[in-house]
Amino acid sequence: MRVSRSPEKRGGAGKIIMISALVIAVLVVGGLAFTFLLPGSDQAEAGAAQPASGATAAATEPEVPAQQVSEDGIPIPTVTFGEILGEGFVEVNLPPEFGKQVWYTNQVDTTNRETTMYVALYNQNQDTIVRTIQMDGYLKGQPLDDAQISVHYPVGPKRLVRYNREHGTIQVAQFYDQPYTHSLFTPKLRVALVNQEVALSNAEGTYHVQLQLDPTGVSDSEQLIFEQTRPKLVEDVLAELRLFVARIEENRVN
């Protein structure tokens, strides 16, 4: 079972994708920002945009998992990937804004033998989950192939960051919650407004930006997805995450 879920009102076949109806305005604003940040990039029009990679298209909004509460009042994620190989609280040396303990679970899917390591990080008071890290295909002592970090800010949009070794990509998806209300438009016009797509990419295909905006104001959130291909940087990030998990493995048996 995956912790995150696909948003109910955007993304995927058969679902309404929230994209701005003001395509020209979005392209101008988004294109200028993209060109400013990434010199030499080119701008794709709505009807002929460079397709985003599979990872970008699959981004789903991170949700804080269902939780139980420990005897000490610390929330524990309720996540299931298979049979539990080991789990519990471990003290790890972290920056001061985090709690002293993390919670981990190491589980194996008996149908495909894929092992998942899942770690929850807390605030200083250990009463709120502020980060979760999911590492699929985890094997102790072996390089990581994939890591997804969900960031839950006290105030502000949720963020999902994914590092994928196979594609050498870093993906950042930012989700902006907004109140849901009824539309002033007829159903036919509303569908016509939100079923638009805008994507931007540079000429080399190493950067992709996908905008999902809803001018009708009736969707529960909007999002911006940015993806870049940086194999060496991905290797470095996954190596540091492997060392972080190694400390968990070491401390849990001491």
Image: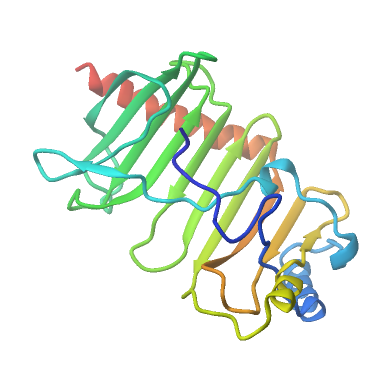
Q: Quadrant of the C terminus?
A: top left
Where in the figure is residue 66, as x and y percent of width and height?
32, 45
Asked if one can make out residue 66 in the rendered structure from this viewpoint, the answer is yes
In the rendered image of this protein, does residue 132 appear above or below residue 40? above
Where in the figure is residue 232, as x and y percent of width and height?
66, 35
Where in the figure is residue 252, as x and y percent of width and height?
24, 22
Residue 230 appears left or right of 27: left
- The front one of 84 and 10 is 10
The image's colouring method is rainbow
Number of labels in the image equals 0
Residue 186 appears left or right of 99: right
In the rendered image of this protein, does residue 101 appear above or below residue 128? above
Asked if one can make out residue 43 in the rendered structure from this viewpoint, the answer is no
Say which residue appears at 39% left-offset and 56% top-offset.
152
Residue 97 appears left or right of 192: left
Where in the figure is residue 71, as x and y percent of width and height?
9, 38
- Looking at the rendering, which quadrant does residue 224 occupy? bottom right
Say which residue appears at 58% left-offset and 78% top-offset.
217
The outermost residue toward the bottom is 184
- The front one of 119 and 11 is 11
Say which residue appears at 87% left-offset and 63% top-offset.
42
Say which residue appears at 27% left-offset and 37% top-offset.
102
